[in-house]
Image (tube, rainbow, N blue to C red):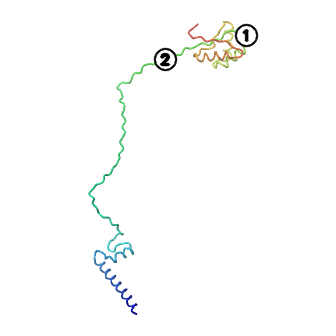
Amino acid sequence: MTRLTISALLLLSSILSLGNAFTATVSSSRPAFGVAGPLKMAFGKDSDSGGGAALAKPKVNIGQKTALVTETKQKVSYKKKNKPAEPVQRREEDFQEAPMYKVMLIEDDGYDVAHVVERMCAIMEDMDEDQAANVFQQAQQEGKAMCGKYPMEIAELYKEQLLRSNPMIFSDIMEENEN
């Protein structure tokens, strides 16, 4: 029985000490150490504060100020060209027209009329069969006849293509101002 009595006395004394601590907490502004911990843990808040559990934030004044560094973008400015009061007079460009060359068909007794007319129409794009037949007749009568006037490169091209025909068709180029 002594064991039971001792344990009952210890339990009763702990209850009484808790009750005294509880009454001390309600009456004072600061909670007692023994009661505040269990109340916070059970209810999640202080008994005398209206909000939630607050984190302790110590106010420490170090005495140093930290500088906040911010980078600002500089605006890029473009220089505008000043417009002159009067417009710039441009010089007139002197273009010289390219000299034109005549492609001349040279007469030969060995020509076949159909072959010459066909090749002239195929090579010279601006010539039709009637014009080719007239040039051929004129070349037979006068010794040579003009097929057309062209820039030098084109005239040389037509001359070479007529010479490469099989059988050959003889032609020549002359400057437009020559007779």
Q: Which circle, 1 or 2, is nearer the viewer?
A: 1
- Rendered-image quadrant of the N terminus: bottom left
Q: Choose top left, top right, bottom left or bottom right for residue 11.
A: bottom left
**Residue 39: where, in percent of width, then height?**
36, 76
SS state under label 1: loop
**Residue 87: where, in percent of width, then height?**
38, 24
The disc labelled 1 sits on which kind of residue? Answer: Gly
Disc 2 designates what residue?
95
Viewer-proximal residue, 157 or 1?
1
Relative to 138, residue 69 above or below = below
Horizontal side of 114 relative to 76 (left or right) equals right
Identify the residue shown where x is 65% and y is 8%.
144
Q: Choose top left, top right, bottom left or bottom right for residue 172.
A: top right
- Rendered-image quadrant of the C terminus: top right
Identify the residue shown where x is 34% and y is 86%.
13
The disc labelled 2 sits on which kind of residue? Answer: Phe
SS state under label 2: loop
Marks 1 and 2 in Cβ contact (< 8 Å): no
Q: Residues within 10 Å of mark 2 (few under 14, many from 20)?
A: few
Disc 1 designates what residue?
110
Q: Choose top left, top right, bottom left or bottom right for residue 51.
A: bottom left
